Amino acid sequence: MKYTIDKQDKYSLLKLHEEKLDSNIAPNLKSELITTHAEGVKNIILDLSEVKYTDSSGLSALLVGNRVIQEDGGIFVLAGLSEHTLKLIKISQLDSVLNILPTVEEAVDAVFMNELENDLKEGEEEN
């Protein structure tokens, strides 16, 4: 699996350099997402702008990433989805489960908004 990872303070940006997110790639993506989270990364942005095709095993990997990150109060954001991938997510009715934004920049904003909300919640709980 070809990808790059850009670790920032509040999030990691994982960019997949593959045309297909299918059964050949999905297991590697799953383990990379789980490993990244295990290393202490709370928020992950997955840039899929180079991915043209996704199948059910690819969707499964996305759902695993989403679940692992959300269980920890973080946010998992998909950015740059192809029309095919977006259609598959909508047909599967996962567009209400997954955080999907058109660009990485918007995904970064969503991470910071989520962090602010978490900080506010923690502040309320302390009072």
Image (cartoon, grey):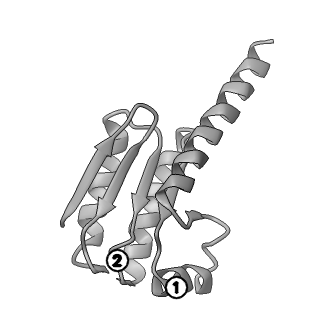
Q: Which residue: 34% across, 77% down?
A: 51
> Label for residue 120?
none
Left or right of 48 on screen, residue 20: left
Q: Which residue: 69% across, 22% down?
A: 122
Q: Which residue: 79% across, 21% down?
A: 124
Left or right of 98 on screen, residue 84: left
Residue 39 in which image quadrant: top left
Camera-side mark, 2 or 1: 2
**From the viewer's perspective, is residue 7 above or below residue 3?**
above
Identity, as a three-letter code, of the amino acid under mark 2: Val
Residue 38 in which image quadrant: top left
Residue 104 in percent (x, y) is at 47, 57
User: Given the current orientation, which residue lies at the most extreme left position?
Assistant: 1
Kind of element beneath mark 1: helix
Residue 110 in percent (x, y) is at 60, 48
Q: Which residue: 37% across, 75% down?
A: 58
Q: From the image, tell me which residue sits under label 1.
A: 88
Label 2 environment density (alpha carbons within 10 Å; few <14, some 14–19, many ≥20) = some
Q: From the image, tell me which residue sits under label 2.
A: 51
Left or right of 16 on screen, residue 82: right
Residue 9 in which image quadrant: top left
Residue 9 or 36: which is nearer the viewer? Answer: 9
Kind of element beneath mark 2: loop
Q: Quadrant of the N terminus?
A: bottom left
Residue 76 or 23: which is nearer the viewer? Answer: 76
User: Given the current orientation, which residue lies at the most extreme top position?
Assistant: 127
**From the viewer's perspective, is residue 78 above or below residue 33?**
below
**From the viewer's perspective, is residue 107 above or below residue 39?**
below
Identity, as a three-letter code, of the amino acid under mark 1: Leu
Q: CA distance from mark 2 to mark 1?
A: 13 Å
Badge count: 2
Q: Tell me which label, 2 or 1, sits earlier in the chain.
A: 2
